[in-house]
Image (cartoon, rainbow, N blue to C red):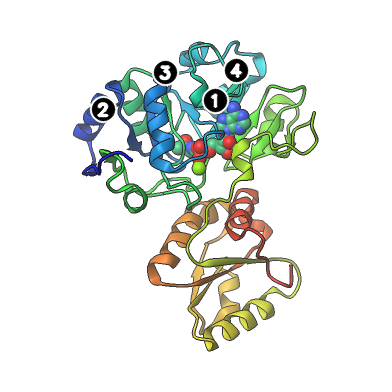
Amino acid sequence: MAARLTTRVLSGRDAVAEAGRLLRSGGIVAIPTETVYGLAASAYDEVACRRIFAAKGRPQDNPLIVHVADMEAVRQIWREVPPQALLLMEAFWPGPLSIILPKSDRIPDTVSAGLDTVAVRMPASQTAREIIREAGVPLAAPSANRSGRPSPTSAQHVLMDMDGRIPLIVDDGPCAVGVESTVVDLTGDVPVVLRPGDIRAEDIARTIGSAEKGTKNRESGDAPRSPGMKYAHYAPKAAVCVYDGEGVPAAVRSCFVQHAAGGGSPVILCSEDAAAFYDGLAVRSLGTGPRDAEHRIFRELRDADARGNDLILVHYEESMGEAVRDRISRAAGARRGESS
Ligand code: TXA
Ligand code: MG
């Protein structure tokens, strides 16, 4: 393993310049984006990209997303830019939409994890785009968490996972969106949303005529098309249990009371409205609607660990949206509430 580094947390103009310097010389740097913090390296530098996998403990077969600061940059990264891609870029860039297309030879196999495609997005975060410009190259960047942990939505979260493993974290405050980008695959006949995010499949379908939801490979039936979807994800130290459907408040309350009586320390995550059901119990609000829930979910998972909660009971409601449902069900793994 590499020698332990001193990890600096910097912000402002100096931080951007220092990030550029490190990235130009083959280093890795944690950078802010509007979705979650990313762990970046030059997308053209195979050795630097290998350092990302090592620092995260990321499986080698899980490809990285490439980040650009201008539309023209995609011409070096994808083999071709089809009309559907141009329409999506016009509509949603800069913003939380990653588009998958066949890759050019400039992109090393380490970035694409051996696939012949690559995901690209232009972040809405101005600081992220300044860092890309300063580096002078597109940046490959997965979320800046240790593999399997909740994605980081603040510089403090990155430090928790990466202290001593990377030289620099650029701090730009809490992320505006809070969940990772929507990932859409344009390599087949029909566009497929492989990972739900703040931009919905319906938004994409409105722009280019159609979009399916799903993670399955059309040809083989069950091989994951997005390699990242097959791994355990987003897991806090606490157990996570998701409840939805009929009779949720009674089931959540009874599980909470039983767990607390046994000496445990449970906490409930629910919408602002549903909090009224849990008067007197430890409850954290995910706000009202998908934007609030996306903004808060990863922070709440990490805060529960920091408080010493050992069980997180999530009262899910459809109003929280698909991106949040995806993240909490993967955080929960197989554990689901009886009432679901
Ligand atoms: O918002 C985001 O997308 C953040 C920020 C940092 O930009 N990045 C991020 O990266 O979430 P990561 O590596 O944590 O997640 C990338 C996801 C994984 O599920 C990966 O398998 C999938 O995108 N992916 C990337 N390239 C792919 C490709 N060529 N084909 C299929 N799936 C791909
Ligand atoms: Mg990730």
The amino acid sitting under disc 4 is Leu
Q: Position of residue 215 (x, y in %)?
A: 70, 39
Q: Earlier in the sequence, mark 4 or mark 1?
A: 4
Element assignment for label 4: helix
Residue 148 location in percent, x, y? Answer: 51, 50
Disc 1 residue type (three-letter): Ser
Report how far apart the C-alphas of labels 1 and 3 lie in the structure.
11 Å
Which label sits in the foreground, 4 or 1?
1
Helix or strand or loop: what does disc 3 sit on?
Answer: loop
Q: Residue at x 27, y 46 (%)?
A: 164
Task: State the residue position of label 2.
Answer: 22
| 72, above or below 140, in the image | above
What number is the disc on residue 112?
1
Cβ of mark 1 under 8 Å from ligand 1: the answer is: yes
Q: Amino acid at mark 2?
A: Leu
Quarter occupied by the N terminus: top left
